[in-house]
Image: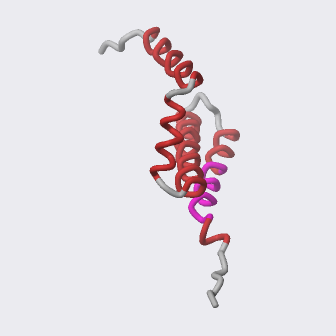
Amino acid sequence: MKRVRKRHFLKEHSLSLTVAALLTFFVVMYVVSDPTTHAGTFYGNAIADWLGVLVFVVVVVGGLGSLEGAMIVTRGLRESDLFRMITRSCIDQLRQCEPVTA
């Protein structure tokens, strides 16, 4: 008879919960700080970075379980119309920027 292992919630989801807690902290700090100050800018950038980490952790580690599965998802995304639209928009925004001179 096979022994059924008990799955521990915290053991399986500790990484995503930790990243979500950090993301929540940065969102709260951003809300209470002034976005025009250095601290507000830092918290805004931290939100963007940690949100990306959270998506990566949930999709690759939790959802798909392998890097190969994530590559399939991103390959499908690259071929989508939404990805092309976002890429074109980003390129257009970069073309509108003036070069910084010292």
Q: In this view, does 33 lie above or below 61?
A: above
Q: Which of 63 and 90 is in front in this view?
A: 63
Label count reads 0
Q: In this view, does 13 lie above or below 34?
A: below
Which residue of the protein is positioned furthest toward the left in this rendering?
102
- Percent of width and height locating residue 14: 60, 65
The structure residue drawn at horizontal position 46% and vertical position 51%, both measured from the top left corner, is: 67
Residue 35 painted magenta? no
Q: Which of 11 and 26 is in front in this view?
A: 11
Applied colour scheme: secondary structure
Is 67 on the left-hand or right-hand side of 19? left
Residue 22 painted magenta? yes
The structure residue drawn at horizontal position 50% and vertical position 38%, both measured from the top left corner, is: 74
Is 88 on the left-hand or right-hand side of 102? right
Q: In which quarter of the image is the N terminus?
A: bottom right
Q: Nearer the viewer, residue 31 or 71?
A: 71
The structure residue drawn at horizontal position 61% and vertical position 46%, both measured from the top left corner, is: 26
Is 94 on the left-hand or right-hand side of 59? left
- Percent of width and height locating residue 16: 60, 58
Q: Give the range drawn in magenta.
A: 13-24
Image quadrant assignment for residue 101: top left
- Percent of width and height locating residue 85: 56, 18
* Dominant SS in magenta: helix
The structure residue drawn at horizontal position 50% and vertical position 46%, both measured from the top left corner, is: 70
- Percent of width and height locating residue 51: 58, 43
Which residue of the protein is positioned furthest toward the bottom in this rendering?
1
Q: In which quarter of the image is the C terminus?
A: top left
